[in-house]
Amino acid sequence: MTKNPARFFLIFALFWSGLVLLFDGFITRAFMNQLRSRSFATAPGHILSSEITTHDDSDGTTYGARVVYEFAINGRRHQSDRVRYGQGSDSTGRWASETVAANPPGATRPVYYDPSDPARSVLQRGAGGQDWFLALFLTPFNVAMIFLWGLVIQARQPAPPLGGVRLVTEPGRILVYGPSMSRAAVVLLAFGAVSFAGIFTLVLPFGFAPKAEYVWAVWALALGAALFTAFKARGAAPSTAPELIVDGDGGRLLLPKGLFNATKSWRQWREWKKAGQSALEIPLERIRDAAMRERVSKDSDGESRTYVVALAVEEPGAAGLREYDVGSWVLPDRAEAFAAWMVETLGLNKKT
């Protein structure tokens, strides 16, 4: 039996949450300071220098703006290079170019400063598109953080019956539907997905400083998607098509193509597709065993693990047994629970 990955999820959730909350705090602080700057006093300022800065790394070049200015309060001169709180850089250079163009050296521009501490000054006051966009940018990361903690909670709880799958019994056959998500999880996923798509829609043409109205439009779409999903989601209802069918009358096991069976290899799918089948058919008499297997996939970001139920099938003319993956779970005990049901339902423990 594979060790329950509850500890791994907990460590990863703590690591992920630490990073996300750190950036949440940074962005929230900058956002609140920008809101507070709306009440700052105003003084005439003199632009000393203005230039676009660049930073090169393995991901490419990013562009920022450095504008140095000075102003006098009660006869005391102050100097700063803060254009706004939370100012950063991006790969488009749009905000940097506009900021430098709007503040050429020698120009006189209004400076907004905190009367209680003139060192706290900005050239741009109030929350703008950049602030709203950074909040939007972190939304998918916060959604992922919530899902991670959901996995931590699930991993520390006993496996649900049959690994969470749903059964519909009909005369002569059993329809198996994949594990369902709660309505809250589906709504949160819809909100995060639309926000994620909106980020790229805004970044590509506008960089990290789009107009606030554009960001609000994405927020509205994300909220609309969440509300629509809230009304349409049916967490307890079966999906439109079963993911696995135990056809006792026909003496076969049917595996329609679906999300639950996404772990099947493309070679398996090509075989039944060429044969003109709408599902992979396995005679029940040829199934010898069902057991949980760990599948490890590697890519540039590292390793990922899923847990499947593998059917050991005896095929004519083949040497040894051939495995077919059925279902995919993040937690191994869920896969083991479903494998045990398959063994019992198909009477595999009675076969020799």
Image (tube, grey):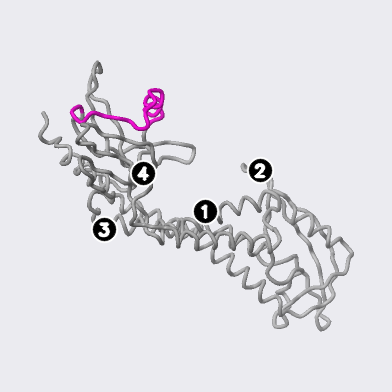
Question: Residue 335 at x, y = what percent?
Answer: 27, 44
Q: Quadrant of the C terminus?
A: top left
| Disc 4 residue crowd, few under 14, some 14–19, many 20+, Cα 10 Å | few
Question: Residue 272 at x, y = what percent?
Answer: 37, 26
Question: Residue 311 at x, y = what percent?
Answer: 25, 33
Question: Residue 218 at x, y = what percent?
Answer: 61, 59
Give the residue number, with chain letter if any, for mark 4: 241
Q: Which range is magenta?
A: 265-286
Q: Are marks 1 and 2 in contact (CB under 8 Å)?
A: no
Q: Nearer the viewer, residue 195 or 90?
A: 195
Q: CA distance from mark 1 to mark 3?
A: 27 Å
Q: Is residue 270 magenta?
A: yes
Q: Amino acid at mark 3?
A: Gln
- Label 3 vs label 4, nearer the camera: 4
Looking at the rendered structure, the secondary structure element under dot 3 is: loop
Looking at the rendered structure, the secondary structure element under dot 2 is: strand
Looking at the rendered structure, the secondary structure element under dot 1 is: helix
**Image mark for residue 60:** 2
**Image mark for residue 237:** none
Q: Amino acid at mark 2?
A: Gly
Q: CA distance from mark 1 to mark 2?
A: 26 Å
